[in-house]
């Protein structure tokens, strides 16, 4: 199992008591078996159970124990790849369709949070996306024009607009509406509990060591304890662990990133409307607030698949993140309370991997690679449900595993 994160994580401290699930103790037969109990797996499990589909979630460690705990909980319809760049890559129609699907997914998360009836920290927010330098301003202007042209909820902020609302100045910014923030740890546990209540079987400490297809088409999963799960369909929701995938078609880069959470800050009124803030520079720096007044910030992505294990090396990076927060808000003096480093997956064409295995009938993948992992997981849950039911989904061809945008990479 890959070491997905290291350090002092914030989110698990926000939930002292949560439900646990017994390991698989007898052979099982279901319509859909989901391998992975993180954001992707529980979102799929909840959506399938809600649709009346017999499903199970098989997690080899603990629910929400992997990348979910290191997720910083920003829900944005804009992507790491700008709409203008995505238009160049896959064409205007598909690029706009993908962005609109992300808008719908953020709204769907809000609806799901309301259905769950638990406090999962979902709060609708807008995002301030600013030009990191004057050189980035022309590209930012083109991005605003493309978003506005296609009806997305955006405003353009001049340097004067930014300075009127914030204690920092930037060359320009796009304000996007329709985004949100969430507590990913609480959300995943609530999804699992909701799926279980609707009939989904959930088993922690259940490691799948073999997957074969029987002569009559059923999939047989074997656990490390020698038990078997028979399923008509299998969804791999294994996060950033590509060695778990049986094929060579997943073209991705696994990097590492850093994040911090401060102690509660006294003068949060200086943070206008609690906007989520990020920038055009790559790798980018980003910030958000929490309901109790903390600042969560992240960035400093590095080209390595292994989180740093040295506390000194981690603090060297996370202290830089804290310094950047203070650059934006000079009066902020709350010390660091949590800091961590985590693996971060990006596909080579900047889109998630969602869909059927092109050479293995009945096998699907739900891999939300990129900065919008939670949004992609939600998108995947409805898309995969449709595929399993034999129904179409409007963006299935854009994110499928043998899509044209991956062919020349």
Image: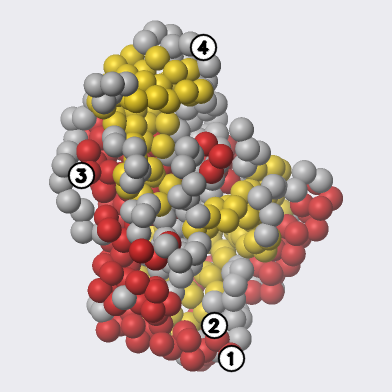
Q: Residues within 10 Å of mark 3 (few under 14, many from 20)?
A: some
Q: Mark 2 vs mark 4: give the one in front.
A: 4
Q: Quadrant of residue 195?
A: top left
The answer to the question of whether label 1 and label 2 lie on touching residues, with beta carbons closer than 8 A, is yes
- The residue at 31%/61% (across/down) is 398
C-alpha separation, residue under disc 3 versus residue under disc 2: 39 Å
Q: Residues within 10 Å of mark 2 (few under 14, many from 20)?
A: many
Q: Mark 3 vs mark 1: give the one in front.
A: 3
Q: Mark 3 vs mark 2: give the one in front.
A: 3
Q: Quadrant of residue 395?
A: bottom left
Q: Toward the viewer: 200 or 333?
A: 200
Mark number for residue 134? Answer: 1
Q: Toward the viewer: 249 or 281?
A: 249
The answer to the question of whether label 4 and label 1 lie on touching residues, with beta carbons closer than 8 A, is no
The residue carrying mark 4 is: 225
The residue carrying mark 3 is: 386
Nearer the N terminus, badge 2 or badge 4?
2
- Of all residues, the one furthest to the top in this rendering is 26
From the top left corner, tell me how far across and down residue 20 is, in percent: 47, 21
Residue at disc 1, secondary structure: helix
The residue carrying mark 2 is: 131
Q: Residues within 10 Å of mark 1 (few under 14, many from 20)?
A: few
Nearer the N terminus, badge 3 or badge 4?
4
C-alpha separation, residue under disc 4 versus residue under disc 1: 59 Å
């Amino acid at each position: 199992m890959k070491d997905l994160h290291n350090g002092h994580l914030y989110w698990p401290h926000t939930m002292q008591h949560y439900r646990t699930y017994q390991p698989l103790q007898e052979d099982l037969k279901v319509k859909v078996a989901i391998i992975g109990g993180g954001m992707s797996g529980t979102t799929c499990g909840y959506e399938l159970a809600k649709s009346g589909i017999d499903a199970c979630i098989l997690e080899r460690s603990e629910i929400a124990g992997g990348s979910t705990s290191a997720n910083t909980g920003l829900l944005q319809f804009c992507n790491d790849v700008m709409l203008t760049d995505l238009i160049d890559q896959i064409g205007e129609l598909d690029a706009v369709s993908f962005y609109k699907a992300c808008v719908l997914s953020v709204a769907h998360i809000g609806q799901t949070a309301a259905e769950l009836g638990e406090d999962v920290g979902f709060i609708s927010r807008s995002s301030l996306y600013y030009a990191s330098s004057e050189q980035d301003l022309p590209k930012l202007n083109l991005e605003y024009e493309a978003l506005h042209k296609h009806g997305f909820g955006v405003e353009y902020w001049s340097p004067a607009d930014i300075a009127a609302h914030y204690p920092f100045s930037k060359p320009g910014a796009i304000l996007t509406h329709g985004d949100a923030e969430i507590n990913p740890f609480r959300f995943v546990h609530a999804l699992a509990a909701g799926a279980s209540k609707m009939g989904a079987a959930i088993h922690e400490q259940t490691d799948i060591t073999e997957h074969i297809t029987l002569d009559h088409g059923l999939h047989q999963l074997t656990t490390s304890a020698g038990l078997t799960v028979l399923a008509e369909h299998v969804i791999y929701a294994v996060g950033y662990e590509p060695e778990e995938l049986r094929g060579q078609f997943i073209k991705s880069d696994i990097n590492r990133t850093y994040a911090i959470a401060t102690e509660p800050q006294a003068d949060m009124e200086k943070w206008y409307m609690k906007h989520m803030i990020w920038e055009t520079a790559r790798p980018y720096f980003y910030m958000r607030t929490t309901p109790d007044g903390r600042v969560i910030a992240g960035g400093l992505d590095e080209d390595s698949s292994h989180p740093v294990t040295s506390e000194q090396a981690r603090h060297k990076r996370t202290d830089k993140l804290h310094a950047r927060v203070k650059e934006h808000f000079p009066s902020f003096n709350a010390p660091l309370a949590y800091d961590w480093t985590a693996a971060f997956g990006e596909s080579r064409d900047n889109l998630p991997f969602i869909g059927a295995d092109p050479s293995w009938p009945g096998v699907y993948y739900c891999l939300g690679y990129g900065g919008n992992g939670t949004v992609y997981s939600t998108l995947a849950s409805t898309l995969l449900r449709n595929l399993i039911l034999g129904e179409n989904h409007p963006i299935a061809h854009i994110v499928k595993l043998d899509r044209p945008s991956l062919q020349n990479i």
